[in-house]
Amino acid sequence: MSFTEDCIRDSLPIWEECLNTPFLRELEAGTLSEDAFLGYIVDDSLYLREYAKVFAWGMLKAKNMKDIRACYSMISFSNEEEDATRLSYLRKWGLTDDEVQKLPQRPENRAYTEFMIASARDGEGMAECMMACLPCMISYCWIFRKLFARTPGIRDTPFGPLVGDYTNEGYDEACRKWINYTDEICADMGKEKKSRLMEIFRQCSRHELCFWQMSGKPRTDLSVNSAPSV
């Protein structure tokens, strides 16, 4: 078993908790309120902005062009693969990304991204960056594939485009690529360093759980009826 697989196995109970949050249960059932979904999309937009900053730290600490290319590739993937669906949902509510970016992150979202950025900033290099970012990327693949396997009809609900983004083969292939890259850069690290890295992975998985729990509650500063007036 590879190091990244060890990290996934360690955090899997947390991902199981994510799967059973009200937000994801209701999304699977097709009963999630539009206000809660709007809040999620808005906070996800704000999250992705901060997520990209983790790789900015990775580029600063990169020791070779391979690491720089890895950072650039992950930023590009996040923007190109996730933006289209997110922006489509925002347009439905009469919102633009520029309007959304003026809104504050909710506390759980802010705590998550601050931890990610601090892990990259205070770490030694790309290993810390990957440990901070992979739990989001890989857990989304795992969660949405679980939901789709249990409830294929979820693709026919208003949440289908979101589910499709994280269940397609391209997303799975990207996750495997980044797992392999992470295993490669962590291969020769000692037990103590790997223990610290696994803790970052675990803490980010816990922040993922908090994010899903947060998303079950609509934002208090925005609703589907007031969205165009942001």
Image: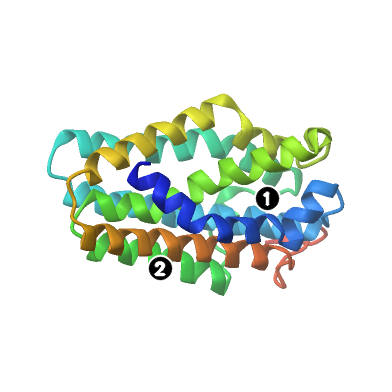
Residue 64, image quadrant: top left
Residue under pointer 1: 95
Q: Amino acid at mark 1?
A: Leu
The type of colouring in the image is: rainbow
Q: Amino acid at mark 2?
A: Glu
The answer for how far apart the CA atoms under marks 2 and 1 are is 26 Å
Residue at image position (73%, 35%) is 149
Drawn side of residue 197 relative to residue 114, left or right: left
Drawn side of residue 29 relative to residue 165, left or right: right
Give the image location of residue 85, x and y in percent: 64, 37
Give the image location of residue 192, x and y in percent: 22, 63
Number of the label disc, if any, that sits on residue 17? none
Q: Is residue 228 visible?
A: no
Residue at image position (61%, 28%) is 168
Residue under pointer 2: 114
For marks 2 and 1, the one nearer the N-term is: 1
Q: SS of the residue at dot 1?
A: loop
**Residue ranking furthest to the top:** 169
Q: SS of the residue at dot 2?
A: helix
Residue 158, image quadrant: top right
Residue at image position (68%, 42%) is 146
Q: Nearer the viewer, residue 52 or 99?
A: 52
Rate crowding at label 1 as few (under 14), some (14 to 19) or many (20 or more) other CA atoms within 10 Å: some
State the quadrant of the N terminus: top left
Q: Is residue 196 above or below residue 156?
A: below
